[in-house]
Amino acid sequence: MKHKNLLGFFAKYPEPGKVKTRLAEHIGFEKAAFFCRRISEYVLKRTAPSDSTYLRIVFYTPDEMRKEFAEWLPCEILQAQKGPDIGERMDNALKEMFDRGAEKAIVVGADIPGLNREIIDNAFEKLDCADIVLGPALDGGYYLIGMKSPHPEVFRNITWSTGEVLNETLFRIKKAGLSYSTVVTLFDVDGPEDLLKTEKIMKDTEGT
C-alpha cells in the first residue's frame, strides 16, 4: 500500500469497564461504552478521506479484539497498536505508516468530537513548512501529531495523561531543533461535563 499522506486513527474497543472509566463513574459502564462507540463512529465518519487526499488506517487496541474490530469496522484497514504506553504506540504507528510509503503521517484520537477531515487536510498542508504538526487539546495534551519522518525523541520522557503533555512535547521538539505548527485546539471526551458539548456538536453537524 503506497500513499503520500497516511492518517492513523487510534481506537480502543468500546468494552464496558475498559473505556471512559471516569465517565462511567457517573453514568455506568454500559452507557460509557455505548457513548465511546458512538463517538468513535461519529469521528470516523467525519474524518473519512475525500478525493484521495489521504488514506486512513485504524490502529486498534487491545490486540486480541481484532475479530471484534473487523466485525465493527469491516471497511477499515486495521493495524494493532504496539507499545507499552501511548508515546511508544504513537511512535510505532508513525513508523509503520512511513514503512508503508507515507511522505507525511498523522495520528489522531477517536474521542475528539470536533475533529473533521478539514482539520486533517490542514494538518497535512502545514507539514509542507514544518517538521511536526500538533493539534492541542484543552486538557493540556494533544489530539493530533504529524511528521514527515520519524522523530522518536519527541515521545520520550513525557509524563503521559497529565496537563503537561503538550508543554513537555514542545520542549522536546525545540530541544531537537525541529520546527512545528499547530491546528485548532479541541476538547476530548473524558468526564460528564463533556457529554452535553458532544451532543451539541453531533446535533449541529447532523446530515453534514
Image: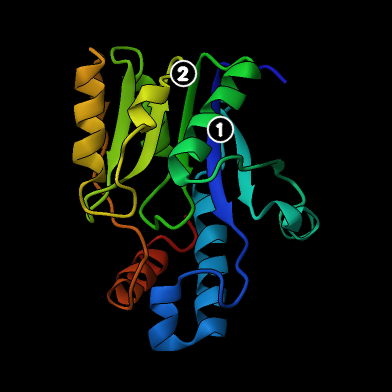
x 75%, y 55%: residue: 64
Q: Quadrant of the N terminus?
A: top right
The one of 161 and 10 positioned closer to us in this rendering: 161
* Left or right relative to 4: residue 138: left
Q: Is residue 3 visible?
A: no
- The residue to which callout 1 is attached is 93
Q: Where 66 sits versus 198, above or below?
A: above
Q: Quadrant of residue 172?
A: top left
Q: Amino acid at mark 2?
A: Pro
Q: How many marks?
A: 2
Q: Amino acid at mark 1?
A: Ala
Q: Is residue 138 visible?
A: yes
* Left or right relative to 109: residue 162: left
x 76%, y 61%: residue: 68
Percent coordinates x, y for residue 66 in the rendering: 76, 53
Q: Where 176 sits versus 47, above or below?
A: above
- The residue to which callout 2 is attached is 150
**SS for callout 1:** helix
Percent coordinates x, y for residue 151 in the rendering: 40, 20
Percent coordinates x, y for residue 28 in the rendering: 48, 87
Percent coordinates x, y for residue 174 in the rendering: 19, 20
Between the residue at mark 2 and the residue at mark 1, the CA separation in whole angstroms equals 10 Å
Q: Where 99 sits versus 120, above or below?
A: above
